[in-house]
Image (tube, rainbow, N blue to C red):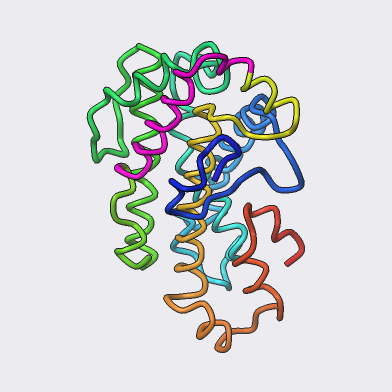
């Protein structure tokens, strides 16, 4: 899963690192700060079908890579909406325990229309849950098999709990710095959230564009010969650029 995550606990296959190599947390936040409002502006102007999981291959940005990418942008927009803008809670080692504790004490909710409290860590926790709920909603629209979408919040809580144990250990900030220096992902909340949103959005894109059976549907529509295999092996929508 991640470089810090014990393989014996990994029950699901998740992205290890960003496409094309390592991407630092500040770069991710900077890109999201630009791309989320740009995407939502295109939606508001009616240039794109929304949510992305309702698109077909004949629609604008109806290719599987765009649906995957835009679905996760739809989920992460709640995080980018947090009024306090204290994104260091997601990306700075010294604030990880504060953020993780706030997430773990937050009662699960089923809302995607949310009210913020004014307390940054609590608001990020609310927003992260809202993003997970959005992905569950989209999974239902796209026809993701129930077995794949059940327990989304519970499963992510387990990941965050494991991250909490990692940060509890002596020397965790130093190990975090070492991982970042070597182009590896430590259990920063930003990486946990972004990777989970990416994983879930991929399932949604597959169901929306390829249907319930990728191999069967690939025979019925005009797709690039290697697209299905490239999609199955992709860790990020950018891996499909040019597909």
Residue 12 part of the magenta-drawn span: no
Residue 170 part of the magenta-drawn span: yes
For the record, the magenta segment spans 154-174
Q: Quadrant of the C terminus?
A: bottom right
- Count of numbered circles in the view: 0
Q: Nearer the viewer, residue 59 or 100?
A: 100
Instruction: Assign the magenta stretch its main secondary structure.
Output: helix
**Quadrant in which residue 94 is drawn:** top right
Q: Would you place residue 219 above or below residue 178 in this image? A: below
User: Where is residue 221 shown, x and y percent of the image?
Assistant: 58, 84
**Quadrant in which residue 160 is drawn:** top left
- Locate residue 136 relative to residue 69 in the image: left or right: left
Q: Nearer the viewer, residue 171 or 183?
A: 171
User: Where is residue 42 shown, x and y percent of the image?
Assistant: 57, 46
User: Where is residue 164 shown, x and y percent of the image?
Assistant: 42, 25
Instruction: Name the residue rendered at 64%, 64% in the picture.
Output: 233
Q: Nearer the viewer, residue 99 or 124?
A: 99
Instruction: Name the residue rendered at 51%, 74% in the picture.
Output: 210
Q: Nearer the viewer, residue 89 or 164?
A: 164
Q: Would you place residue 95 above or below residue 115 in this image? A: above
Instruction: Name the residue rendered at 57%, 14% in the picture.
Output: 171
Q: Would you place residue 34 above or below residue 42 in this image? A: above
User: Where is residue 166 shown, x and y percent of the image?
Assistant: 48, 25
């Amino acid at each position: 899963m991640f470089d810090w995550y014990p393989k014996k606990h990994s029950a699901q296959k998740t992205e290890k690192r960003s496409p094309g190599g390592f991407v630092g947390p500040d770069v991710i936040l900077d890109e999201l700060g630009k791309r989320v409002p740009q995407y939502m502006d295109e939606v508001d102007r009616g240039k794109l079908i929304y949510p992305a999981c309702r698109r077909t291959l004949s629609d604008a940005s109806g290719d599987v890579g765009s649906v995957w990418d835009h679905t996760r942008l739809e989920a992460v927009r709640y995080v980018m909406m947090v009024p306090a803008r204290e994104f260091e809670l997601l990306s700075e080692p010294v604030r990880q325990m504060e953020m993780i504790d706030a997430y773990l004490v937050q009662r699960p909710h089923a809302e995607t229309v949310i009210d913020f409290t004014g307390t940054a860590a609590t608001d990020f926790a609310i927003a992260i849950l809202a993003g997970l709920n959005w992905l569950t909603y989209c999974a239902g629209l796209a026809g993701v098999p129930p077995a794949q979408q059940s327990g989304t919040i519970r499963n992510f809580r387990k990941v965050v709990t494991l991250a909490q144990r990692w940060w509890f250990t002596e020397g965790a900030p130093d190990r975090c710095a070492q991982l970042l220096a070597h182009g590896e992902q430590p259990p920063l909340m930003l990486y946990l959230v972004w990777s989970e949103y990416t994983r879930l959005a991929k399932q949604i894109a597959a169901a929306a564009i390829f249907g319930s059976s990728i191999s069967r549907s690939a025979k019925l529509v005009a797709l690039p010969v290697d697209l299905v295999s490239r999609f199955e092996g992709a860790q990020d929508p950018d891996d499909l650029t040019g597909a």
